[in-house]
Amino acid sequence: MFVQDNAGNGSSNRPRGTTAENNSNSSIAKNVFLFLWLLSYSFLAYSAPASNEQNFSTQSTSEFTLSSQNLYAIEEVIVFGRGESLIGSAGAASEGAVAGNDLLVRPMLRVADLLEAVPGMIAAQHSGSGKANQYFLRGFNLDHGTDFTTYIEDVPWNLRTHGHGQGYLDVNGLIPETVERIDYRKGTYRASAGDFSMAGSGHMKTISSLEHSFFALETGSYNWGRIAGGTTTNVGDGELTLLGQYKTYDGPWQLPENLRHQSLWAKYSENTEYGNWDISLSGYVASWHPTEQTPESAFGSAECKNKFCSLDSSASGKTNRWILTSHWTSDEWRATLYGQFYDWHMLSNPTYEVNAQIDQFDQRIIIGGRYEQNFLKDEALEFLVGTEWRYDHIAKVGLNSAQRGQFIENISNNAVNEGSLGIYGEAIWKPVDELRLTTGLRGEFYNFDVNTNRGSGNSNDGHASDSIAAPKLGAAYNLNQQIELYANWGQGFHSNDARGVVNKQSPVPGLVRGTGYESGVRFEKGSFKITAAYWWLNLDSELIFVGDSNSVEPKGGTERRGYEVVAFWHPVNWIGIDAVYTGSQARNSDPEAAGGKYVEGGVEHAGELGIAATRNAWEFSARLRYLGPYPLLPDNSQRAKSETMLNLRVAYDLKKITLYGEVLNVLDHDGKDIVYFYENAFDSEGGRVSRAEEPRSVRAGLKYNF
């Protein structure tokens, strides 16, 4: 529906604002959450036993400075990834990792909830279970991924010059059982992170093998169903691991979603004299009929009886994505090569005007790779150099005008060849034992080539190129074994949609620069760990290429700042408790040009409180998520209210058989998963348009290990 340069801003014909509204008073919800958070951690901080202090220390290896080498080495101790000691290895207070039971026992409404393991990240949805989610982090409405990049085994999953949104990030194809850990960073401070990483980046590591072959069967409310299975077998000198899943879901909507989702994942891994080598294949095919955001003024009308109504029964979507990856690692270097095939299209009508339905499409092949080399690594100095390249051959991207799925005319149809090459280096120097200084530099070159396909309703041919250099600086000072201080500065970038870059009427820069700052502290005492950071991030521009009209809308620069506090406590070896609270302020640099000083969708507060427990045969997890209020329009005349949601999961292990269940939205909260404000068929001068939060649902499953 919308091809967007950056997060959080819309055009006159696109939804404005974002996620989560309910009828609760936002200040009460925020105060309740803060009270629970402070109550829990004031108790935890003073009662944490010191006996667990050594159980969860890991040493830094690899470019990302967070190692899983010894993660599972301790017998009879349940592993919580947030329990890793990062003093002496992390480059910033906002770096961290999530692994082990933090992921395994997490209740999930959708697979994108895995990314909510990144502190402060919120995932929402406005167009069905097969479409990329909306993401919110550090004052950004990341739309469908812009400015938060996700790598899975060093393969970037964000899609540039996409038919729906720049940086489109669809993780629906992930099989949760394949994810071993998520390492995350915030800000612009590390040289290895490239496009779409100004708010942050997530690096997922997948499993190498399964301890047991398994088969799982799930059922639940609203025709939820899931079948999954996996096995590992010895092949030659290595191991071959295979997993697959099939999902169905209708949802609470008047029009059943009729989700049909198939995923396949295979990985062969082998240890050689040159290091570890693996090759993997992931495939994802899905179709669905979404109920999209609905004008609230239509509720109770003949066309729309309630908030679960479907005003366009012909809306639909399809995704087909396959990724082949080969990965080599050794003590001194690592290399990745990958190829992707992607085919996507979606029918939607965000305004519900007659003849306003749009059919978006995107078909491409991607090849790329990364290579990193440690040229020097000793106690005083580390020096790493790397390169990352990618080439997108987009056979067709654009949109058609349609009516109830029937073609009317083409609006745009382009073939795009977009290539990029990044070269980066990073050095870490310890002049004294207590001080680590980090400096980095990343240079990036992009080439954009756009051609108009035959039959296109709009001609937009052109060629352009752009380059950028992004320096990085950081310092970490170890006060003692329990406290480390951090200061970071760096520049980053994101790319614009190629069609906007070559647009002859109003071209935009190919690469947009951002500058970030951060100061923070990390405290670790025994099994209690807490970090606090204050950050700033300024972007030169947030220009938007609007796919609906094949035009560019300028939004100017933005300035963001905020804070985050992240804590974890491991009171005994079978319980982990974590909490996150963030605050942010997002403002337009030129309020007059932007129509106001507020950045639409700039979430002002977010938080999460969770507990995970594994005791004997039992597993339990509870997660409370809070999303604060935020502006829907630049003048702040329309705002979304806060949302609080509680999810639970419990499991019982009968050795070969595990029984488990989830209760999602336990309190049956009557909230909004997504909220916008824009003109539509029911509000000629603009009105609130929302998608309801899914009501309480129950899911149950059985897993058989063999």
Image: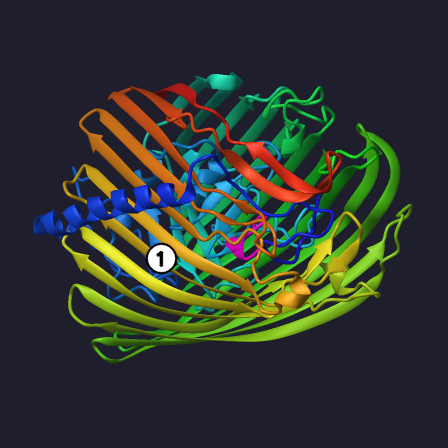
Vertical order, 694 against 191 (above or below): above
> What residue is shown at x 68% (from left), y 72% (from top)?
466
The residue nearer to you, when weighing 475 against 625, is 625
Vertical order, 77 against 443 (above or below): above
The C terminus, quarter of image: top left
The x and y percentages for residue 196 are 56, 59
The x and y percentages for residue 674 are 56, 39
* Residue 493 in view of the camera: yes
> What residue is shown at x 45% (from left), y 53% (from top)?
604
The x and y percentages for residue 173 are 54, 36
* Magenta residues, start to end: 140-149
Question: What residue occupies the far bottom of the structure in this picture?
Answer: 431
The residue nearer to you, when weighing 159 against 242, is 159
Vertical order, 465 against 614 (above or below): below
Residue type at numbered disc 1: Glu
Q: Secondary structure at mark 1?
A: strand
